[in-house]
Structure formats: structure tokens, C-alpha cells
Image (tube, rainbow, N blue to C red):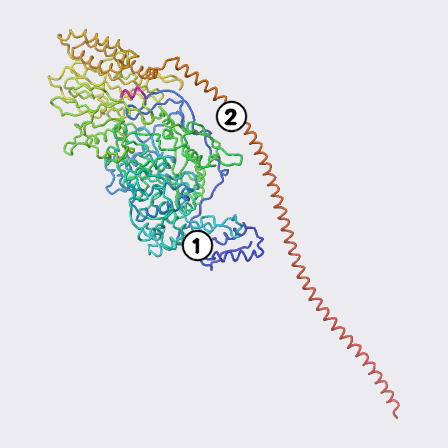
Amino acid sequence: MFHWQRSNAVAFDEPSEAAIWEAIDRHDSQGDADIRDRLEQHEDMLRGRDIFHGFFLRTPLLSVLSPDSVAFDSPAEWVTNIRLQCGEYNPVDSTIDQISWGMCDILQPAADTVEPVGQSRLLSHRQLHLPTLKWPRDSSVGQVQSPVAGYVCWGRYILRAHKYTLQEAGIYEAVYASLFDFGRIPSSWARGLVEFWDSGNNSSWVGPEELTVTLLELQTVSGLPIVGCHFEECIPPDEELFRRRPSADGNRRGRLVLPDVYPALLRHYHQVYRSSRLSMRVRVAMPVDIWVQSFLQDRYLTSTVVSLYDPFDLGLRPGVFLSEETAEPSSVGCRSPALRGLDEDLVLAGFLATWLCIFVLPLKVGSVRCSALLAASQLSQGQRLSLSPTVLARICRVLRVASEASSLELQDSLLPWYYLYGWIHLHVRGAFSCLTCPSYFLERGYPTVIQLAQATSTLESERVRLFFFAPHLVVDRFSIVHQPDAVDLPSYLRGHVLFDGLDSQRRCTLLQNRSTLRVAEYLVSIRPGWLCYRSGNFIIFEGYQPNRVARQFGFSQATAYDGRPLIPGVADTRQMDTVPLPARFYAASVVWLHLLRFGTGSSFRIAPLHSRTGVSYLHLTWVRLSFAPLMERGARKFEHKVRTLGLPRGQRSSRSSSRIRGDRGRHDDGHTAARGTTPSPVRVRDTGSDSHRTETPRSSGGRSSSRHVEPSFASVDQPPSPVSDHFSTPEEVFVGPRRSMDAPHLGSEYIPDPRLSDFTGYSLSDPLTEFNFPIDPYGSFLPGEMFRAGSFWPGESFRAGSFWPGESSGVRSFWPGESSGTRAASPTEPPNVPLCTPTVLDLVPVAAVPFPKTHPDDFTSSSSAPVGADYVSEIRCHAPVAPNPWHGDMYGHCTSFLQDLIARVNPGSPDSMVQFTSTANYTLGLLAQLGLEDSEMQYWETLCREVEFHIRRLQSLSILRTRVSLPELQEKVDGCQAAVAVARDEFDRSTEALRRHQESSSSMASEIEGLASRVRDLWRDIKGVKSHKSDLQEGHNRRERLLQREQQRNQMLLQALQAAETTLSRAVEELHTAETEYQILAEVVSQLGDLRARLP
């Protein structure tokens, strides 16, 4: 086109658009210039221009890189089936249950290897050493912003009038969720999350396990898209703000690359800011009240609380179910609350800017950022943006900075905390007390954060801290859910291996339709990488490692490797200020490309719901070696505080408070109840009566207390087995004087021994720096295996422990649900104590069984534990007393009764098996009271335990419950085999038909590709001919112009020639006349001379 250079004399806002196009059209008067040349000339003339006179800080947009420009190393299979030495972590009874070697699905990159012992980075662990590190009373952590006046009215109108635009952008449900109020939730869970946030891994520790906010779970909670164009906050310079591209309608000026409403939105912000006379030093943000007033009429500037059962205030009566007409009313009759004269696109973009700055990404309380107007304008045009990764990057940054802070007076703690509360609601059953959510929202897949509308939670921060330290100690109130049901994925794809590839036209197979978009978001969620948030020149990178929390996806957890790629030009992601600005922007582009890349050729698997998951034994060993002392100390500290919560303030003591615990695994108030409001845990008294709590009176010298006998509890992720169901609660608890089980009684002398806590199997003695069992990182950890103090095995000799003066100490047991952290010495019993002091031989502390001293040769070795190693006996251990002669006559009757009781155990009679334990308990207790000798007592207890063990095995057999005969099963198998044969034949025929269709499709595709190649060749020839024609035409036009100029010159020369010839003819005529006259003159002169000569 032409060369244009800005001079210093040109104003900042010059040249205008009209002047630019006038200059371009003047140099393209014939209209034959290429459209790309015109648009490039337009961009060149925009460089250096600023129509806002420096009001906004301008920064360039991130460049969009080609997928082939950067190479990333990725596993070929993101879900790998390998052989692990693994175990199920049971948060109630033991750290590892059912240890085995087997094939498990894990998330890559990970393996079953040993990792170096780590160091704690948790704020809660530092608080144990620094008591002064406390939360200030006015801390804003966990606080939700107050509702904005007019936002609900504005949002209702936008949802009705622009429903399809919001759905196209993938944010309709997310905007819908922003109408509700989440300000009633206290900040106890938010503070607990900050205290237990691991800043190195961006995950939260709950007991010995990690949980983190995955992208898929954040999308489930918030409704924000994962896959889309990368999100960035900036105001680009004029050459990018008004950059144009060729238009499909043939317009010679093209069309804007960015949305048309974006410049208008910036002008509106500029005008409102100046007209409000706000400070010019803080131009990056505007008070949200002023922003909303610039769009809405005054009568709509009110604060409204939206009801969960009538979102659009249609006057629905209580109990009326929501339908599509009432939950999502149409735009018919919908009146706009906007001021007159405002364009509808501008109203929509202005609302989305408010939604982004107040609800999705709040950075400053009650303000709207000008940098968010770009994303708002893009969303208003239906463009899908990747919002979930950006929000998660912001969440990880704030939690990481808060957890690393030396003081809890935090400056930057503003987050969408309701999203984090919604994530906690997914994984912690019992965390919140919620209203019953209408089924309409559940069936339509609305964000689960809606369930927390007007929800409440416990104010007992001590109980929340105890949950994070030791979840099994508060299982009466909270329980962990690793794989939530609310994470919606196509059910027909669960359990299948999927492929991320390209089709014949080089298009990503996972992005071809909306049905596979959810699968694409799942693939992004399981891959480790980096999360990016960009605001102007400020860029943050936060690590994302879902392979550390594989159980949240339904897989087993192994030792995770760091799968995050190296970022070019960035040595330390925490020191981004030292990176040059161009390198910073390029790194952000690479991070976005790595996160949202598709067509990688890798395969992955979606786990079925309620998949059986486990944790690698070596990984749990690393946790124990790294953090056990600190976690044990924190559990003891907050366990004592929780004990005293239900007591009056004057009666709270550090030693005499009993453990207050409810029924394990049976408190489901975390999720919505059947109707109405589920009682909030904060309103439940800790000292209330419980049907499962048995009063155990002490001796006259002690205070009466209560002990809650607690059942074994399976992980909420697994369906309960028949055996575990049978162990739900003991039937009977003997009543007798209370004795401390922390140490045996040897008269009044107290002999301290190593403490054994029930905190997830962590065992350590005083001081806290030692374990009281040998550590073997390669050994197996087998429930029921013999320990020095002797876990009881059926069939083995049992050294019954006596807790009376003068008797030898044996098995050391604990009161169910009691932590051995209570080290108070037991009082000396008075002489009038009962003859028998029955205690529960609780085999639950099998988690503290030490590692064996042998190393497995390989992972294919079988466990050395006998069948039923996880068996928990309900037979009581009766401490024998001195024999009494008058009881000797009853020995034979009791032993005969036990013989008959054992002989009556019949696999065909369930009643004989169900009543065996309680009957044997009473009989053994009677024998102990009768003074049976120790050896015989041990014999009968051992025999009864063996019978009980076999009964448990019989009860676990399904054939005894179904009563199906072998011929019936064989007939069923034959029928299934016939059905399989028919299905195999149909499958073979279908496979053959599929092969023929594939061959036909392949041949057609080849033919289409050939025709397309021919069309491309013809188009190339046509373009060449058109180019040659245009060249000839231009040459012809140039020759025609030369011909015209030459003709004009020829005419001029012809006229000059004719004038010269006329002048010449006149001169010749004059010459002839002169010659004739000269001749006449000569004749006259000659005649005159003759006359003179004749004169005389």
C-alpha cells in the first residue's frame, strides 16, 4: 500500500478511523488492492494511538501458539494398570486394611516406589510450635461478600432475555447460581482448609491423605467451563483493540477481531468513572454500586434474597415442585431494568463484568475491574472461555500465600469461598446443614453450590481442626467421600478406555460435539500441569497435580511423580517479577497450550462409580515417617478440646473429661435431608443421650462417665460387606467399675509404657520423636499380625492379661473409641468391687501392628496373613478372679452348655450363628465368676473365638444367604453361556458389517480427498490464471493510458504543424511578392538610368 509513520505532531487519539480508511481508499482508488494489505495498513496506522488518552494501562494480548510449535512429553496412557502393594485406608479403625498385592489402576505419572522422607509445610503444624500464631478476630478468610443492590433483578432479566447466549458460552448455570445467598456459612471450614493446605503440592491434608480441588470438581461445584479460549485480563493497545480480519460478506474494511461491544464497554467505563469524579490514581477498579447504577433504573436498585424454591419470585406456594416454566421462565413479558438508550449487548456485557468481578474472580471487595471487561464482552457474544483453570489458579495462589504467611493478618484473602465450601460439601459428609435442594436442579446438572444456599455449618473450629488432623476421631459428625456421585460423567463410558486422537480432517475427536465435551474436560482434569492467571503484566503460575489425589477419580493412589512440564524462560514460578515481560507472556501462552491440548494420541479410562480404591503401602509409610509425630500431637490437642465442648465452662478439665462421641458412620446431615432443614451440627449437644452409649459407673472414688462403644467403620467409598455390617454395634456391654486401659495395675504403682493411640494407626511413645515399633518400608503391614503385646489370633495361645494386683500383665487393650492420650493413672479399687471386670478385647488397634521383619521377594508374593486377618472379635476378655469352692459344682454344667452351644452351630441354621457370640459371652463371664482356672478359661475363650471366626467366614459366604443349589447355578451358567454365544455371533456379524462400512467409508474418504485435492489444484490454477489476467489487465490499462496521452500529444503537435505550414505559405507568398517587386524595382531603376543617360 503506502508507507505511513506517526510524527510527534499527531495527537494521541489521531488518526481517527474515518481518516485511516480515507487514506487507504485514496491510495486504492481502483479497489484492486488485496484485503489483507488494506487491513495490515490499517493496523500500522493504529500503532501508537490511544483514544483514551492514557486512562487505561495497555498491555498486549497473549499470542495463540500452534500445537505443533511446542513439544510436550506426555504418557501414552494416563491411567495405568500396575501391580501395587496397596491397602484401603480406613479413616475409622486403621490406616491400612486388607493389605494385598494386586493390579490397581493409578494416575500417571506415578509408581509404587519409595520416596524420600518429607518435611511439613502446613500452617497447622507450625501453630503447634507457635501458639501465638492465631487468627485475628476481624480476619476476612472465609467471608463472603455482601449482596450487591440490584444484582438479583439484573441477573433475573439477563437469564431470561439472553438464555441461549449464556448457554452457548457455557455459563448459564453458573450465572444462575450467583443469584443465591451464601453468606450464612461461618469461616471455620475455610480457616481449617488454609491451615492444612500444602503449599508445595497445592493440596489439603486430611489425616494421612491428600485432597485437592480438581478442575472437574470445581466445574461440578461452580458450573464454570474448563475447555475454551484462554482467559486473560488486560486492555490491549489500539492496534489490537481495533484489529480487523477479512469479512465473509466481502466488506473491504473487514470486521473486528474482538467483540464489537468491547470498545463501547470501555468508553462506558471511561465516561462513568470521569462523571463520578473518582480518584484518578485508582483507575483500575470502580465501586460496584456506581457501576450498577450506570446501567439500571433507580427502582431496581434493591437487595433481594432469592428463595431456593421460587428463584424468579413468581409467587409459588411452598411445596410446589419447580418445572421448566417456573425455574427457567421465558423472556415473554420480561421488562428490561436498564436505563433507556443503552444497547442490549452493552447491558449484557456490563452484567457479565459484574458477575466476573463480584462472584467468580473477586480481587477487591465491592469493585469492578476494567481489565475484566474483555472477558465480559467475549462471553456476551457466546464465546466459551476457560474459566475453571483461572479460578483454580487464583484459589491455589491465595491458599498457598496464606499457608506460608508468618502472620495471619492476611491482606489478600478474597476468594469465591462458596466454591470451596461446595467442594468441601462434596467430600465431607456432615460438614454443612442445608435446605432440601429441589430435584429440578439435581436432575438438570446445576452447580452443586446451589445446595449451600442459606446453608449453615458448625462454629466449633476445634472439631473441624480435629477432622483435618484425625478424621476417624470425629466420624460421628464427619466422614470423607473420595469419589462424589455429583461429578457427572457419561455412564455408558465409565469403565471404558477412551482415545484422544484426530480424525481424517485433523480435528480433535473429543471436541466434535457437546456430548464428548465433558470427556474432554475430564481428560484435562486428570493431567498434571500448570494453571495460569494473567491480569495485565501480572502473571501467576500454580501447579496442578491430580496424580496425587487419584482416589478422587476412582483410582488407587501410588507415589506420585512431578508431571508438570518445564516452562521456557521461567526458573522459579514464585519469582515471576524477575522474568522479562516478553518471556513472561510467551510462558503464559505455553502453559495454556499445554493445559488445553488435545489430539495427543494418548488413552485414558473413566473409573466406574464407587470403584474400590486404595493407597499404596509405600506412600502411607512415607506419610507416617514424615508427619506422624505432628499429626499425633495435633490430634491429641484438639481431641481434648473437643471433649470439653459439651461441658459447662466451669467443669472443663484437662484430664477428667471423657470422650464424647456419637454413632459412627450413621450421621448423614452433611447432605440434604428428605425435607425441610437438616439440623445444623452446631446445634447438637455433645453430651446428649445416645442409644449406643453405655453408662459405666466408676468406683466410689471416681466420677461417673460414659463410654461410647463404637463399631468398625468402612470407607464411605466402598459398599459395606456382610461382615462389616454385622460388626455395626455390639449387642451387650458389661457393666462394672471403670478402669484405665492405658497400663496394667500393679497395686498402686503406676508403670508407664509406650502410648498407643488409635489415630489412624500412628504409634509413638513419649517423647514424640520416636516410634514404638520397627519401621520396614518394604515389609507388609498385616492386620491381625502378632505384636509384642499380642494381637489375638484364633487358634493361637492367648496370654490373657490380668489387670489386678499380683497377676501378670498380658494383652493391652483399649476402651472402644478412647485414645490412649489420656494418661491418668487408674485409682486403686476398693475391696467391695465385683468379682468380674469384663473389658472389651478390641482388635481394632490392628493398625498399630508392626511391620514384619521379612521382605517380600516381589509384588507377586502372597500375604503371610491367614484368611480373615481383618477379623475383629466381639468375644470379651474376662479377667479371672480367685476361685471359690462353692462354684465348683457349676463348672460341668457351663462347660457342657458351651459344648452343646458349639455343637449346635450349623451352617444351615442362621439363628445358631447369630446368637453364638452373646451366649458365649455370658457363659464365659459366668465361668470367670465361678473361678475357672486360667488355663481352662484360656482354652474355652480360644475355642469360642475360633468358632466365632468360622461363623464370620460362614456369614460372608453368599451361598448361605441366597440358598441357591449348584444345579440351579449350573443352569444359570448354561443360560448365560448361550446368551454369550448369541451375543458373540451378533457381535461378529456387527464387526463384519462394521469392517465393510469402514472400508466403504475409507474408500469414500479417499475419493473425497482426491476430489478435494483436484479442487485445490483447480483453485490454485484459477488463482494463477486470475492473477495473470489481473497482471495483463493492469498492463493493458497502463498501455491505454499511455496511448491516450500520446494521442493528445499528437493532436497538439498536428495543430502546431498546421500553424507552422500556414505561416510558411504566407512567408513564401510574401517572398514571391517581394521578388516580383524587386524585379519591377530593378527594371524601373534600369529604365531610369537609361533615361538619365539620354538626358543631354
Question: What is the span of residues highlighted in magenta in the rendered image?
Answer: 721-727
Pick the front one: 818 or 575: 818
Q: Amino acid at mark 2?
A: Ser
The quarter holding residue 898 reads: top left
Q: Is residue 79 left or right of residue 404?
A: right
The percent position of residue 532, horizontal first and vertical second, equals: 40, 40
Q: Is residue 899 left or right of residue 575?
A: left
Q: Which mark is residue 868?
A: none
The quarter holding residue 203 reads: top left
For mark 2, what is the residue? 990
Cα–Cα gap, marks 2 and 1:
65 Å
For mark 1, what is the residue? 50
Q: Amino acid at mark 1?
A: Asp
Q: Is residue 897 left or right of residue 1023?
A: left
Figure check: 341 above or below 725: below
Pick the front one: 466 or 228: 228
